[in-house]
Image (spheres, rainbow, N blue to C red):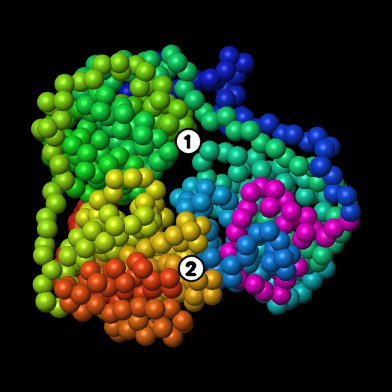
Amino acid sequence: MLVLPKTDFISFPSSPSLNKSSIADIQPSMLLDTSSDNSQQSESISVASAIVKMLEDLGVEYAFGVSGGAIAPIWHTLQHSSIKLRHFRHEAGAAFAATEAYFASGRPIVVFTTTGPGITNALTGLFTARWEDAKVIFISASTSAPKRGRWALQETSNYTMPSAGIFTSESLFHYATTLECSEELPEVSRRLAKGLAKPNGFVAHLSIPTNIQANLVETSLASVNLSCTPATASEEAISECARLLTEGSFAIWVGFGARFAAAEIRKLAEKTGAAVMCSPRAKGIFPEDHPQFVGITGFAGHESVLKYMAECRPLRTLVLGTRLGEFTSFWSPAMVPSRGFVHVDIDPEVPGTAYPSAETVAIQSDVKIFVKSLLKRFPKRQNKSKIQSLPRPERSAINPSQDSPVRPEVLMNLMQRVIVEGSDAIVMAEGGNSFAWAINLLRFNKPNRFRVSTGFGAMGHFVTSVVGAALTHHDKAVAIVGDGAMLMNNEVSTAVSYRIPAVWIVLNDGRYNMCDQGSKMQGYKDMDVYIPQADFVMLARSMGADGIRVEKESDIQAALEMAMVSTSPFVVDILIDPTRIAPIGTRIFSLISQGAKN
């Protein structure tokens, strides 16, 4: 192995039959079974029926979307299949919900829309799915070929919409195509199956002209059985990593891509005495109450991390499953250890990107497989005396009072007790001050309990996707959202339709408060950030949900407990103190450094 001044990618095949140049192309390996047993369509069926059968065979359990005439054949077939169709109020909400439904269930989710604005409305949610590494199949309608260029209603063709990036495989979709005839279905099926079998995300778009949907299938479809072999490093590479890490003290930097390796990471930390820090998306993968946990990095992170790097600077940092992007690191030089990084990721493009000048040893591997193998190289437990001296995130208890409005810190403390520690609910935080308070103050000790988007960071993500998470989690999901996001695009009505036990906790302060506080830090005054203060309980009840309004801190706990036992969708509308400064300083300083200041 080479230790390089910048970044070199070291990919070691796990099988002697694979060479270094070919492994990137074939990992994970795909074994395609096209045997004739039970694989042939025994009777003529429509293209719509063939596509829905294909989706069923790919493991799809849910389809979210908004209907329309142009998609009617597929919509009708989906509704009368084993796939559970859920009709949303907006296409973006359906796509956001699909992203979180995937993470809650581990199964691919279908999003369906009609032509034109149905497609464009869904794009923000689909971009989010791509950034979050979800597995989503987008099915849309397009204008029939004979009608293209003739001003069809909501025409969807090269005459009216850009094809690059929407109907082709580009930066949005890993795979995209327009089905022009039924003979293309076997190749579509193969490509979808291959993409879904990959260990990381996969977002696809299948556009089907309206006249094609009802056509009969003339080509038989073979079943495709897939076996995925995750990318792994060789024994030689892992031994060299162990040698590098034992040359001196090292820290472990955990990202969302390590969520399936929680037990192995804890064993490694306890066996070696390494300090552990996590990205905001990785909260809970390593227990936040563990004595070796030094804090959350990046946006709304903990001062204890920077204190650790200043006072106990490790020789190297083992990075597991994080891109180290802006919200994880802010590209701070203070986070670079003296001998750089050993960076493990399933994506060969990730290591070295955030810190191109730092010394980086890059390993392409599934994180869990890598850590399990690495554990064998550390047979002796380190002296635990060093662990006691590690900086730890500070926790302050603020007692509730009779005052109004509610301080966000008090709300988070009570959410910790009632929701985080008192239930198994998935907790998700919307962009803005909501996710700043949640990242900084909530503490999780198990993986897959907390969701936040610090990549694409689309406003409206969790205010809608809480519905998808609660649906496939088969239990409560709780979204912490601002009033701006709640007014933008909520799916309370969808939750009511299907009796989905979603909970919205609304930080109602009558403004876009992150914009308000942040713009002031940037030196701007008198910005238009105010919103007429809405009554979200009245709004919820008008749609058939339940809710309660909280104006005093002494009423928070009872309101949260009511929400958690409710069998209906529930909105907790909290009049929040807008003057409490959220922990957003690192983001604002990053913007200022980029020139966004007055």
Q: Is residue 434 left or right of residue 185?
A: left
Image vertical order of residue 296 relative to residue 205, above or below: above
Give the quadrant of residue 321. top left
Q: Which is nearer the eye, 549 or 515?
A: 549
Image vertical order of residue 411 relative to residue 133, above or below: below
Q: Which residue is mark 2?
A: 500
- Give the residue at x 36% y 34%: 263
The numbered mark at residue 347 is: 1
* Residue 142 appears in view: no
Q: Which is nearer the eye, 32 or 531?
A: 32
Foreground mark, 1 or 2, reads 2
Give the quadrant of residue 182. bottom right
Whether residue 426 appears in magenta in the rendering, the answer is: no
* Amino acid tagged 1: Asp
Q: CA distance from mark 1 to mark 2?
A: 35 Å
Q: Is residue 393 left or right of residue 169?
A: left
Q: Which is nearer the eye, 66 or 381?
A: 381
* Residue 231 appears in view: yes
What segment is highlighted magenta in the picture? 44-73
- Give the residue at x 31% y 27%: 268
The numbered mark at residue 458 is: none
Query: x, y percentage for residue 243?
Result: 31, 15
* Amino acid tagged 2: Ile
- Give the residue at x 54% y 71%: 498
